[in-house]
Image (cartoon, grey):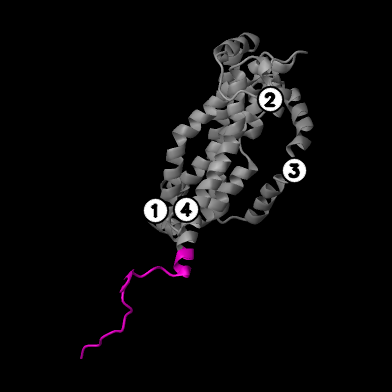
Amino acid sequence: MTVIENRPPATTPSGPRKPTREARTLAARKRLFGNGRRPGFLTYGLLFAFFLASAYPLRWSLIIGSRSNEALGQTWPPLLPGGNFWTNVGEAFDTIPFWLALGNSVLISGVITLSVVTFSTLAGYSFAKLRFKGRNGLMVAVIATMAISTQLGIIPLFMLMRTLGWTGEIGAVIIPTLVTAFGVFFMRQYLVDVIPDELIESARMDGASMISTFWHVALPAARPAMAILGLFTFMTAWTDFLWPLLVLDAGNPTLQTALSQLQSARYVDYSIVLAGAVLATLPLLVLFAIAGKQLISGIMQGAVKC
């Protein structure tokens, strides 16, 4: 028996049927807010606004750093860079030991990043998946250290470095930050959910040792979080100013402390200072450009595996 459904006609005698008001409203909301798979115009607009707000300081530094100091006193600030950028860069090179400071910053940031990522991953895996006495208490102690301000420990830390005779040495900047409480907590929170306990038990039943289980099971799953932690650790170490300023001398500075020497005189030429600031920012931009795509792909791979 054939059942004939009474469906409304798709067209009317006067032409195609017009969408209802509710359908038009729903379509407008999807275009504005997105449909769950693709973002809408509002999301793109907010991202573009955040991008402009974030890029404005760098643009202003580039404009002033490529002109003379008189550009700051103009009624209408210039919109385009000038032609004095390399002249100002040369003045900065003659004023501060730029290449020495750049090498120190690269060495300090690289060693700190490698150490923090390595130790934080090992400690985070231990707190997340290993069972030992005092695990919860130690984790609470690690989290409690995050509540202590960094400035409160500067004086005793400086006294310790002076007692050891490390003041003025790069090791005084590297050693206190070989591992961070935030890195341990971050990796622990990531690994506690991304690695099933059954996978670790299966590896142990197959005869894998603890180190082998970490290397073949935990480490591949932890790579997205390690990439994020490494990127932010490098950026934090690169831009650190207070502790290197206190523990290092003027003859062995980092890049950030060397730039402060450009404005130590009575008359500050901000065009030279900002030209040096642009050069100090370029390595971070190059790092984000190189690691950005790999970072996003690693995050997506981790999300798919989860």
Residue nearest the viewer, comparing 165 with 270:
270
Horizontal relation, residue 151 to residue 53: left or right: right
C-alpha gap between disc 3 and disc 2: 20 Å
Q: Which mark is residue 244?
A: 2
Magenta span: chief secondary structure? loop
Where is residue 182 drawn, in percent x and y? Answer: 63, 44
Which mark is nearer the camera, 4 or 1? 4
Disc 4 element: loop
Between discs 1 and 3, the one toward the N terminus: 3
> Which residue is outermost to the top?
94
Q: Residue at x 44, y 70 (%)?
A: 20
Disc 1 element: loop
The quarter of the picture where the N terminus appears is: bottom left
Q: Residue at x 44, y 50 (%)?
A: 302
> Which residue is outermost to the left?
1
Amino acid type, mark 2: Pro
